[in-house]
Structure formats: structure tokens, C-alpha cells
Amino acid sequence: MVQIGEILKSARLSKGYTLDDLQQMTKIQKRYLIAIEEGDYEIMPGNFYVRAFIKQYADTVGLDGDRLLGDHASVIPEIHGGVQVEDSGSFSPTRSETKRASKKTNFNYGGSVQSQLPTLLLAVAVIAIVLVIWKATLSDDGEQIQTEVASNISQTTLASQETVSSNTEQTDSAVVAEQTAQVTLVSSADGYAEYDITSLSLPSELKISAVAGGSSWISVSVNGIVQEPSGIVDSENPLTVALPLNTSEIEVVVGVMPATIIELDGAVVAMPADYQEIQTQTLSFTVKSVE
């Protein structure tokens, strides 16, 4: 009887297929294809792979795989355990057979990647050709395009620098505009303190409140005129007094000095040295410059 390997090899050659062609078509490693043609089944991962590979080989070269397996059943290793060989040529070994095959042969799972390598190389070659054609079509206008791109980049950079410079100038102006008043304690004695105010931007406001949990009685005069309302303040109910453009003198009478917080144009006023000892004090503020 003619060996099954000889039949398969003859059919392959009649189709004009090389072993590399068959490897690409079946996804079966070339060394296993050679083993099938030579009848060397010992290097196969397992008996189920022998039958599956032979069927797939036969179907690919135009033979009836099932009939070929039946005619040569006596020379093909027996399969122990459930193995399903589908008409499409695919095979599904049982879990136990797969484990035994892995332990026996250390199966090379990189074979599928290697078999797809020619396709990947072809794709890379196509991409390279496209890039060459693209560069060739741009060769006439390449310098002009590069010049336009460089010009656009230069203009964008210049605009960005001008924007940064403008923003910096605006920021500097904002810092000057937001500069708070400078309140300096000039003298303090016997419950009376004098302050000088500079860099006060008028109109402005004077805010008086109290520490958390505390309260104080307050009276405020601006240019010698008592401002309303006067009375009790605390942390939740502060007193705010508007300071007009012509403000030159401010006087604040405080009933409970340790509990009082005074803010002028956003700046917290430093308390006199004796503010903890003397409960009731008068604070006099002189505006030195009006902006």
C-alpha cells in the first residue's frame, strides 16, 4: 500500500504548492508537514494532532481527508479520549489531551506568528511605497510648504510672546491697582492710638468686626462727623463704614478692644501694644495721601 505521506506529497506537488505555501494556508508548522509526508508521527504534539493535521493537509490539497484517514486507519495512531474533527478542518482536543501534549512536547506557540510574518512584511512594504509616492508628489511644493509652515510657526510664536508680554503688563497693572492701604501705628498711650494711612485708594471702606464668640461696642467718625449706624458688632454682624473721596481723618471708639478686628481697605489694622489691658480705646487715623 502506498504510504499516506506519499499520497499527500504527490497531491501537494500536483497543486504546485511548496511546504511554505502549505504552512501559510493551513497554519500548520512546516516541520509537522514534513513529518506527515515522511510518516514520522513521533514528533507530533499528540495522536489527535496527527489525525487533525493529516485531514487538514488532505483537504487543502484537494483530497478527501475523512476517506484518507479511513483507508489508512491501521497506520495512524489511535486516539484515546474525545477528539472532534470538523468538516472545516479545525479540531478541538479535550482538556486532558491538551495538557498531556503540552507536557510531552513543549509545543511552540510562536508558530502562528511566524507563519503570518510574510503578510506583515508585505504590509510594511506597501506602507513604504505609499510614503515614497507621497514624498514624490510633494517634491515640487515641499520647500514652499515648509516655508509656509515655518512662517506660521514664527507668527504664532511672535503672537504668543506678545500675548505673554501683554498679560504680564496687565498683571503688573492689576497688582498696582489692587495694592492695599498701608496703615502705620505712630503712637499709643493711655487708651489713645494714632495711625498714619498711605496708599489709600478712595472711595473705600472701613470694616469692624469681632473675634469668634466675642462682641464689641463701636462708634466711628469720618472728618469729625459721627457715622451711622454705631453699636454692637460681632463676628456674624460686622460694621461697614463707607469712606468718601474727601476722607482725611477717621476716628474709631472701641468698647471692648481685645475682641475687636479692624480692616481698612482690606488690610487688617495692627492693634496698640496695650489693647489687652485697656478695654476702651480711641483710634485716630490720618490719611496722608489720597489716590
Image (cartoon, rainbow, N blue to C red):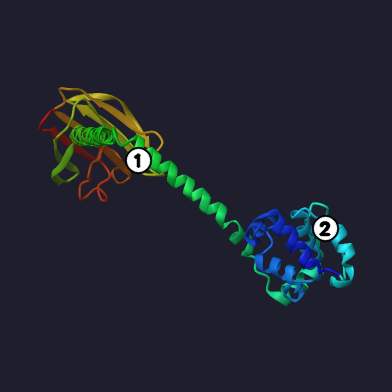
Q: Residue at x 43, y 47 (%)?
A: 128
Query: Residue 253's spot in the image, x, y percent?
Result: 24, 35
Q: Is residue 277 above or below residue 280?
A: below
The disc placed on residue 65 is 2
Q: How many marks?
A: 2
**Residue 180 seen in the figure:** no
Query: Residue 4's spot in the image, x, y percent?
Result: 81, 66
Query: Residue 40's spot in the image, x, y percent?
Result: 75, 74
Q: Is residue 91 left or right of residue 159?
A: right
**Residue 173 seen in the figure:** yes
Residue 77 quadrant: bottom right
Q: Nearer the viewer, residue 70 or 239?
A: 70
Q: Residue at x 66, y 60 (%)?
A: 23
Question: Circle 1 sits on which residue?
Answer: 210
The disc placed on residue 42 is none
Disc 2 crowd rating (10 Å Cα; few below 14, some 14-19, many 20+) is many
- State the SS at label 1: strand
Residue 266 quadrant: top left
- State the SS at label 2: helix
Q: Are marks 1 and 2 in contact (CB under 8 Å)?
A: no
Q: Residue at x 89, y 63 (%)?
A: 70
Quadrant (top left/top right/bottom left/bottom right) for the N terminus:
bottom right
Q: Earlier in the sequence, mark 1 or mark 2?
A: 2
Quadrant (top left/top right/bottom left/bottom right) for the C terminus:
top left
Q: Nearer the viewer, residue 180 or 190?
A: 180
Query: Residue 249's spot in the image, x, y percent?
Result: 15, 29
Q: Residue at x 21, y 38 (%)?
A: 282
The type of residue carrying mark 2 is Gly
Q: Is residue 72 left or right of residue 173?
A: right
Foreground label between 1 and 2: 2
CA separation, marks 1 and 2?
99 Å
